[in-house]
Structure formats: C-alpha cells, structure tokens
Image (cartoon, rainbow, N blue to C red):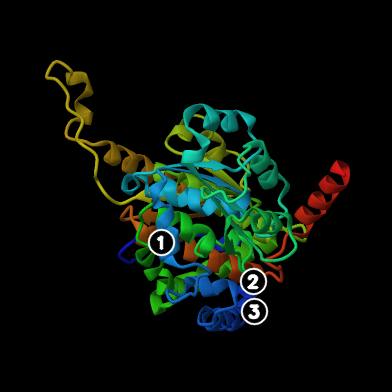
Amino acid sequence: MKNRNIIYNNSIPKKYLSEKLNKRLKKNFNNIFTDITKNINSQNNVFSTLNKNFNYNFKIKEINKFKKFKNVVVIGMGGSSLGSEAIYNFLGHKINRNFTFLNNIDDTKIKEIFIKKKTTKILYIVISKSGNTIETLSNLIALRIIKNNSRNIMVISERNNNALYLLAKKKNFYFVEHKKFIGGRYSVLSEVGIIPSILMGLNITKLKQDSLKIFKSKNKKFLKESSLNLTNLMNKRQFNNLVLLNYVPQLDKFLFWAQQLIAESLGKKGRGFLPIISPAPKDHHSLLQLYLDGKKDKIFYIFSQDKNRNKKIKLKSQENILNFYKYKNLNQIKEAQTNAIIKSFKNKQIPFREFKIKAINEQTLGELFSYFMVETVITGRLANINPFDQPAVEKVKEDTKKLLS
C-alpha cells in the first residue's frame, strides 16, 4: 500500500495461514470496520479522536498561556506519557522547548530536575486517567511542588472522586478533564497527547488530518489483509514474538508506544504477541544470527526511511581501500542493510511486514498512530479478545494498594 507518507507491505508466507479461517473472518471484518467508521463520527467513542472535528475539553487560548514555559515535565505512566514522548522524539527537529518525561519511579531523574532548573520555572503536566496511579502520584509528591494556586501545574484526569482531581480542585491547579470513554493507550490523539503537542509548537491539524486515510479503498484492502493475517497467526500460536526492527531513530519512542498498545490490548486468554524493540543496524551485530537461524517463532516489523537526507561521506584520496563507500551517504548504507535483511527473510520464508517512512512530519506520525490503533482493535475483536481492558494489570494494581495500606 502506498500513499504520500508511508509505504506499507506485508510478506507473510501462505503456509503459515489458514485460508479456511480467513474466509470465516472476512465477514466479521466488514462488520467491525463498519462499526469503527460509524464511531469516528460520534463524540463519545475511543475512535472519535481520529476525527479532525473532535471536541476537546480545553480551549487552545488557555493552553497557549503556558507557552511561556521553556521547560516542561510530563508526569504519567504508560499511555499517559508514551504518546507525547513519541511525538517529542519523532518531531524534535521542530521543537524549541525542553521536555522531560517522568514515566517511571526514578529518583535520579527527579534529582536532576532539581539540580538543572528552578522548579517554579518548569511547567508540570500531571496525567492519570484514573487519577489514582500510584507511580504518578508518588513522583508528584517527590518533586515537592504542591502549593496552593500554583500556576505551573496542569492536571489531566477524570472528573470524579479520585486523588488527582481532588488535589487539583483543592489546590486550584489548572485542570483538564480526561474523557472516561478513552483508555490510556488509545489517548494519544485526545487531550493527553494534543496538549503537549500544542506546547511543543506543533501543528495539531496536520497531526490529525491524515487519520482517516486508512479507511479509503486501497488502504482498507491492506488493513483487511493485515488484520486477517495477524488474527490467523495469533490463533495458530506458532508465532509468539513480534520484533520491531527499527532503522529510523526518530521512531524509537513511537515503538514503545506501539509495544504497550499491542501487548496490553492483545495479550489475553493465553494469546498475544510479545513486542520486542530492536534498534538496527546495531542489532545486526548481536541478535541477527538468532533472528535468521533461531527458532521460527517471530514475526518482524521493519521500519525504514525512504529518503536520502544525510551528507555524503567524503574520503581522502589515500584512503583507496575504502572506495566502496565513495559517493554514498549514511541513509544509503542503512537502506542496503534493510534490503539485505528483507532478501534473507524472503529466502528463509520468515514472516515480516514493512513500514517505510517517506517524511518526518506531523502527518506521518498521525497516520502511524491511527493505523496501529485501528488495526490492533480489529485484530482483537476478530480474535474474540476485548482490546480495551487489562484485567490482569488491574489485579496487580489492587494487590499493590493492599500491600501499601
């Protein structure tokens, strides 16, 4: 599948697929796809965020007031921070503010914030859908910034009797309501990811304008093929590992976002894929032998870039021994490595998919977010898995609270 931003390609050998199962799933796909397209045009569904006319729980003029802060700390776990971190990493060349992400319990990073900057000159965006996320609340307390009427603290959570909302109300922090019908890992194009994007100075219209491309004729055909294949492979349970082989450093944080989306949405009922982020070509020198000659239990997603932007490597005349590099650039070298991997995968009949990025911009990233969310939900529903809950995780959260009480 080709378009302006991304080239998509599937290479799944037919021997791994059940044609009988695919035929049974095709009708289900059409029903699910129709349901999703209807939900996009509503204002109370997780897929509403793909609509460029989605109604946010904030006014842009109010958010613009916070642009006076050149340093921003985003405090959140999982989907509350992974999306905005992916945006910051991918579009960093356009951003002139410094963003730090407190996405784990890390006292070293907290100390660094105290050392480098005056805490009053930092904007803190505290995000938790439930408003009770232990790690988020712990980091907020550890920063020692809670004061009445603080003008440098923004809170995004549900509006109910949760700890974060009650604190924001009591201390008079700027508050934005997190919509109840949008789960954390699907929230990147809602207030959770859009507010940080505005503060980064990005074009949020462009970030969302290509979201609906995946529903057009050729794109729908590819989406259908992909969803059927993934459901087929997941049900067969031969392939348990999903290796995200990345040749585009700007996509590193996006892949962490995708890792959570895929693992938490599909890892249920004894099924699912384990997404492994594998930076390339670095991992050619550590894991490639296993990938090519090890156990055949892995599907590969290859992320590459279809653009020569880097300067040519200049060699002096006495360096004739290195002449095969002459007139090459770094992107050409990575492209050759990517093509060599693809050739090996095809020869060994290793299943893979390719996502070739044509431009580093808002449209490309918005399309990637949208495509992966839709494909993951469809795959889950085809496999009779609820892609929106995480019951096993909730049980661990409950046990943690009991141990701390």
Q: What amino acid does circle 2 point to?
A: Phe
The quadrant holding residue 158 is bottom right
x, y percent for residue 60: 42, 65
Assess disc 2: are there few (<14), some (14-19) or many (≥20) residues with their C-alpha within 10 Å of its C-alpha: some
Q: Nearer the viewer, residue 138 or 401?
A: 138
Measured in 3D between alpha carbons, the distance from the residue under mark 1 to the one under mark 3, in whole angstroms, is: 25 Å
Q: Describe the element under mark 2 as helix, strand or loop.
A: loop
Measured in 3D between alpha carbons, the distance from the residue under mark 2 to the one under mark 3, in whole angstroms, is: 30 Å
Q: What amino acid does circle 1 point to?
A: Tyr
x, y percent for residue 275: 60, 49
| Residue at mark 3 | 24
Mark identifier at residue 393: none
The answer to whether residue 173 is seen in the rendering is yes
Left or right, 24 with reference to 368: right
The answer to whether residue 9 is seen in the rendering is no
Q: Among all residues in the image, which is located at the extreme front?
A: 148
Measured in 3D between alpha carbons, the distance from the residue under mark 1 to the one under mark 2, in whole angstroms, is: 30 Å
Assess disc 1: are there few (<14), some (14-19) or many (≥20) residues with their C-alpha within 10 Å of its C-alpha: some
Of the two numbered discs 1 and 3 on the same chain, state the one appearing first in sequence. Answer: 1
| Residue at mark 1 | 8
What is the quadrant of the N terminus in the image?
bottom left
Q: Among all residues in the image, which is located at the extreme top?
A: 318
Of the two numbered discs 1 and 2 on the same chain, state the one appearing first in sequence. Answer: 1
x, y percent for residue 128: 64, 55
In percent of the image, x 46 and y 48: which residue is there? 347
Q: Describe the element under mark 1 as helix, strand or loop.
A: strand
In percent of the image, x 47 and y 50: which residue is there? 86
Q: Nearer the viewer, mark 1 or mark 3?
A: 1
| Residue at mark 2 | 181
